[in-house]
């Protein structure tokens, strides 16, 4: 087993504690949520499993034509490219060959060799709904010994404000190896990578929010779990890792950047609780350290004038239930949670996490949401997900929102 796989096996329980953790987002007492014209309460209405998208990742991952491509991963994000292709970004990723089940008509599953390599990040290209190729992995090299990069949200924007040339900007979380409880790394910095178009070559990586001087790792903030575009601004959400040290909840933060400025550290403005300010210490938009806050993985989209947030539910329901919240402003207050949905899992003992919306695949009142799956236990986790490759691949649902009044 590789060192990376050993880390996966030994730390999976804590990972799930981080990203599945109990979250309850509540508005301040007396706040009625009034916002701009057209903002209205929204919640998940109907939903169904998206077998086509889920099946496409299974088809591509099981394809044995290549041994250096994606066979499973988590941290699922996507971005539409100007030529119509879709770029999928993943964090920890398994490569290598996948073998067909010994008994295709029985209970055996497609499996991966125990020596299969795992890299910290990868990118897969989709065209016309079909996955085509994996870019050379890892796409983003480690910044230094004992450090790695996890890609999160991305967007296509002008190379600089007002420019006609467009590039892909990818938010990256830099983490540094640490001791328990930081077995999944100490949060270190938020970076932005610039990829050229159309060849998707990594041109540069710029550090935009350095957290190394923050003495308490649980209070370090990494940005990029999700982003929303509105009125010439990109709102970038992030969070701290408070749950890693058993604080009841983590806190959520938001920054904003003018279109074309994601790769410029001086263009970033942070919400201070009262105003947007460059170079300021960000203040939480959600989280009181006791009952209100977020996990480290959530997604925000706009539905008309309403901001809708998706995350795992509070408590033990967070192992399998996705809930939603709404706000009239990117800074909150957030209202909810609404009644959750329980998307399908491949088998018992598997947990769901990291719900991510994919507006570029949505339309006509439909919204596509992905969620990652992984083995819940800490014993032999890597062996279990190698023995059944479906345990470490994204799954998808299609949902419709409704009026929450």
Image (cartoon, rainbow, N blue to C red):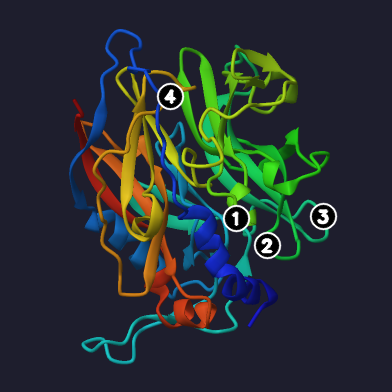
Residue farthest to the bottom, as pictured: 102
Of the numbered discs 4 and 3, the one sitting upstream in the chain is: 4
According to the picture, the residue beneath numbered tag 1 turns out to be 246
One can see residue 123 in this view:
no
According to the picture, the residue beneath numbered tag 3 turns out to be 144
Res. 116 image quadrant = bottom right
Which disc, if any, is residue 319?
none
Judged left or right of residue 361, residue 202 is right
Residue farthest to the left, as pictured: 46
Judged left or right of residue 144, residue 285 is left
The quarter of the image holding the C terminus is top left
Q: Residue at x 79, y 61 (%)?
A: 146
Q: Nearer the viewer, mark 3 or mark 2?
A: 2
Percent coordinates x, y for residue 108 in the rendering = 31, 87
Q: Are marks 1 and 2 in contact (CB under 8 Å)?
A: yes
Q: Residue at x 25, y 34 (%)?
A: 43
Q: Count neighbours of disc 3 (C-alpha within 10 A) and say few if under 14, some if 14 to 19, many if 20 or more.
A: few
Q: Are marks 1 and 4 in contact (CB under 8 Å)?
A: no
Which disc, if any, is residue 28?
4
Of the numbered discs 2 and 4, the one sitting upstream in the chain is: 4
Res. 208 image quadrant = top right
Q: Secondary structure beneath disc 2? A: loop
């Amino acid at each position: 087993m590789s060192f990376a796989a050993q880390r996966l096996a030994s730390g999976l329980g804590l990972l799930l504690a981080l990203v599945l953790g109990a979250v309850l987002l509540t508005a301040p007492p007396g706040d009625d949520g009034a916002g701009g014209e057209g903002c209205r309460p929204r919640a998940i209405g109907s939903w169904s499993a998206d077998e086509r998208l889920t099946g496409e990742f299974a088809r591509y991952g099981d394809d044995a034509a290549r041994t250096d491509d994606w066979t499973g991963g988590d941290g699922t994000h996507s971005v539409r490219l100007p030529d119509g292709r879709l770029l999928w970004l993943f964090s920890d990723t398994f490569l290598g060959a996948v073998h067909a089940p010994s008994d295709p008509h029985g209970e055996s599953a497609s499996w991966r060799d125990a020596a299969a390599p795992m890299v910290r990040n990868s990118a897969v290209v989709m065209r016309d709904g079909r996955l085509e190729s994996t870019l050379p992995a890892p796409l983003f090299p480690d910044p230094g010994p004992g450090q790695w990069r996890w890609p999160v949200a991305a967007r296509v924007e002008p190379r600089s404000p007002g420019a006609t040339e467009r590039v892909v900007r990818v938010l990256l979380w830099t983490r540094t190896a640490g001791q328990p409880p930081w077995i999944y790394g100490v949060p270190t910095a938020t970076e932005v990578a610039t990829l050229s178009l159309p060849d998707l070559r990594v041109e540069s990586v710029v550090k935009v929010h350095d957290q190394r001087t923050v003495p308490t790792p649980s209070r370090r903030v990494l940005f990029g779990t999700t982003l929303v575009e509105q009125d010439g601004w990109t709102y970038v959400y992030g969070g701290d890792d408070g749950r890693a040290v058993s604080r009841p909840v983590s806190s959520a933060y938001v920054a904003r950047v003018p279109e074309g400025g994601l790769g410029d550290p001086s263009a970033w403005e942070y919400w201070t609780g009262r105003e947007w300010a460059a170079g300021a210490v960000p203040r939480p938009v959600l989280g009181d350290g006791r009952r209100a806050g977020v996990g480290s993985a959530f997604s925000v989209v706009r539905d008309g004038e309403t901001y809708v947030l998706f995350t795992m539910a509070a408590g033990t329901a967070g192992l399998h239930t996705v809930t939603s919240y709404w706000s009239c402003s990117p800074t909150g207050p957030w209202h909810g949670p609404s009644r959750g949905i329980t998307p399908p899992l491949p088998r018992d003992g598997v947990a769901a996490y990291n719900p991510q919306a994919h507006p570029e695949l949505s339309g006509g009142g439909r919204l596509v949401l992905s969620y990652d799956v992984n083995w819940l236990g800490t014993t032999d986790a890597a062996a279990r997900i190698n023995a059944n490759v479906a345990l470490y691949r994204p799954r998808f649902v299609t949902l419709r929102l409704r009026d929450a009044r």
